[in-house]
Image: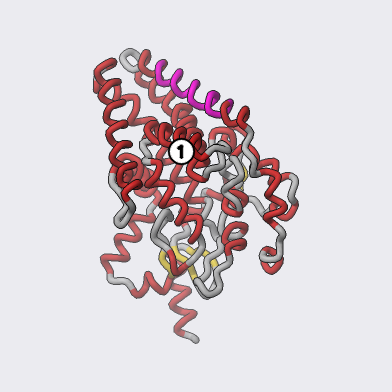
Amino acid sequence: MQIEFDKLNWKDMIAPYTEPQLGRSVWQVVNTLAPYLALWAVMVWTVDWAYWLTLLLAAPAAGLLIRAFIIFHDCCHGSFFKSNRANESLGVLLGFITFTPFYRWRHDHAIHHATAGNLDKRGIGDVPTMTVREYLASPWYARIGYRVLRNPLFLFTLGASFTFLISHRFATPGSGKREQLSVLYTNLAVFAIALTLSWWIGWERYVLIQLPIMVVASAIGLWMFYVQHQFENVYWGHQDEWSFVRAALQGSSFYKLPGVLQWFSGNIGFHHIHHLSPRVPNYFLPKCHKNNPAFQITPLTFLESLKCPRLHLWDEQAQRLVGFDALRQYRARTASE
C-alpha cells in the first residue's frame, strides 16, 4: 500500500468535496458560537454560588471553543467560505475568541502543511521531535530539556496553556508585517474583550470563568494535534526521499472518535484527508473518507492514542517512533553493526 500511495489520483478523488456550502458553514458558526456564549452566560450566573458547577460547565465550553478553533482553522486554509474576504474576516474574529492571531497562525500552519514528516524541515508549527541519533549526540542539558518538553505532565498542561495564552502574544521571528500586525491587533482585541467583561462582571469572575475554559481547551487541542502526528508508525523522511502524499496518508492519523467527540473536534480526526487537501471543509471530511476506499487507512482509536505520549524519538533505522526506553536497544544494535 505504501508504494500505491504516490500513484493515487487523489486530486480527482477529493475535488467533489472542496466546494464549501454557505448554508452549512453559517449553520456551523451558529451552532458553535451560540451555545458557547450561552454557556459563558450560565457560568457567570453560577460562579459566585456554585463554582464547582462553573468548572463542570468549563468542559463543554472548552469543547465548543475547540470547535470554534476548527472553523478558524478552515478559514486559515480558505476552505470555509468561497470568498477569501469572508474567510479572513471570520478568521480574524474567531482569533479574538480563541486568543490566536489569524495571519500569524495561518503563516506558521501553512509551513506545517508543507513540511509535515520532513526530517530536514522541522521546527515551525509542529511538536519538536528529535531522532534517536540527534538525542544521543545532544549535551546532557539538551536531553533533559527535551525530556521535560515531551513529558505529558508538562506538555498537555503548562506547555499547552503557554502556547495559547503566552506564545501567541508574540510574532514568530522573521515573520512579515501582516503577521506582526495580526499579533498586535489580536492582543488589543483580547485585552479589550477582557477589560469589558471585567468591567461588567468583575475581573475575578472573568478569570475564574475564562481561564479554566482556556486551560482545558488548550490541553485537548494540543492532544488532538499531538496524536495526529505522533504515533508509532508515523511517516518521516529526509528531503530527498520525502513524499507529500505519504506524509498526508501515513504521516497524519485517522483518529477515530465517538460521534460526540467528533462533533466537538470538527471532524479533524480525519486528519490524513485534511493534510492531503486542506481545501476540504471540515464538514465534508467524513463523506470524502466514506466514499473513497483508498483513504480508509487503519484508524487510530482513542484507546490506542493513549499510548502515543510514550513515544518521543524517531528511530531512522527502524522507521518508527519509539520511547526513551528503546535507547538501550538502539545502542546495542548500533554497537553490533
Spot occupied by residue 198 in the image (x, y as percentages of width and height): 26, 21
Residue displayed at 37% across by 73% down: 136
Residue displayed at 71% across by 61% down: 8
Give the answer, above or below, for where 40 lies relative to 262.
above
Please tell me whether the stretch drawn in magenta is mainly helix, strand or loop. Answer: helix
Spot occupied by residue 211 in the image (x, y as percentages of width and height): 33, 31
Q: Which residue is mark 1?
A: 88
Residue displayed at 36% across by 36% down: 99
Give the answer, above or below, for where 207 lies relative to 291.
above
* Kind of residue sitting beneath label 1: Glu
Residue 304 visible here: no
Q: Camera-side residue: 318 or 330?
A: 318
Verify whether residue 35 appears in magenta. yes
Q: Camera-side residue: 279 or 159?
A: 279
Spot occupied by residue 307 in the image (x, y as percentages of width and height): 52, 53
- Which segment did they paint magenta? 27-41
Residue 220 visible here: yes
Residue displayed at 51% across by 36% down: 71
Give the answer, above or below, for where 116 lies relative to 158.
below
Verify whether residue 183 appears in magenta. no
> Is residue 271 toward the left or the right of residue 290 in the image?
left
Q: Camera-side residue: 145 or 106?
A: 106
> Is residue 8 toward the left or the right of residue 272 in the image?
right
Q: Secondary structure at mark 1?
A: helix
Spot occupied by residue 314 in the image (x, y as percentages of width and height): 47, 66
